[in-house]
Image (spheres, rainbow, N blue to C red):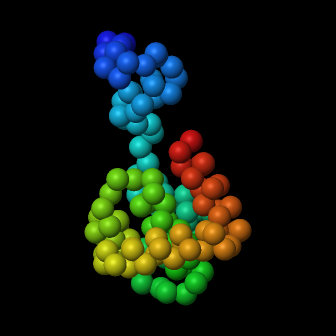
Amino acid sequence: MTRLFAFASLVGKPITQDLTQDCLADMLRSFERKVSIEEIKRKVADHYNIRLSDMVGPKRTRCYARPRQVAMYLCKQLTSRSLPEIGRSFGGRDHTTIMHGVRRIGELRGKDAEIADDLELLRRALEG
């Protein structure tokens, strides 16, 4: 409360919901549920009905590569992990592979309604 009152007097505005959210954004974020890379991989593997070992394995067929890229995209969006960290958790892949997967799913998200729906469904399931 002290922080909020101080912030309001500093900026010279009345206390509103928007001002409160601006002032306490960092505190509110720290209370949000943290999602792990492992949890994302498990949810994506379950959603696409593939084994977790196939998702992180070397197979490059579309039935494994697309879910892998979806999981990489969600890891980048929902965690604060670096690209090399994400790559290590996906079977030691290079950070540029993660960048490609994230970029590819980002492109497909706007063109492919099924991918967009999958991403939204998985995001909701992970963020609880």
Q: Is residue 55 visible?
A: no
From this view, report whether residue 5 is shown above or below residue 31.
above
Toward the front, the furthest residue is 12
Q: Residue at x 32, y 67 (%)?
A: 83
54 left or right, relative to 90: right
58 left or right, relative to 82: right
59 left or right, relative to 128: left
Q: Quadrant of the N terminus?
A: top left
- In this view of the protein, which residue sits in the foreground, 73 or 52? 73
Q: Quadrant of the C terminus?
A: top right
112 left or right, relative to 86: right
Q: Residue at x 35, y 53 (%)?
A: 80
Q: Residue at x 45, y 25 (%)?
A: 19
How far from the left and from the top, in percent, is residue 34? Answer: 41, 43
How far from the left and from the top, in percent, is residue 110? Answer: 63, 69
From this view, report whether residue 119 is shown above or below residue 97.
above
Q: Residue at x 48, y 65 (%)?
A: 73
Q: Is residue 65 visible?
A: yes
From this view, report whether residue 42 is shown above or below residue 21.
below
- In this view of the protein, which residue sits in the foreground, 10 or 90? 10
- In this view of the protein, which residue sits in the foreground, 45 or 103? 103
- In this view of the protein, which residue sits in the foreground, 105 or 10? 10
How far from the left and from the top, in percent, is residue 18? Answer: 50, 27
How far from the left and from the top, in percent, is residue 50? Answer: 58, 71
Tally of marks: 0
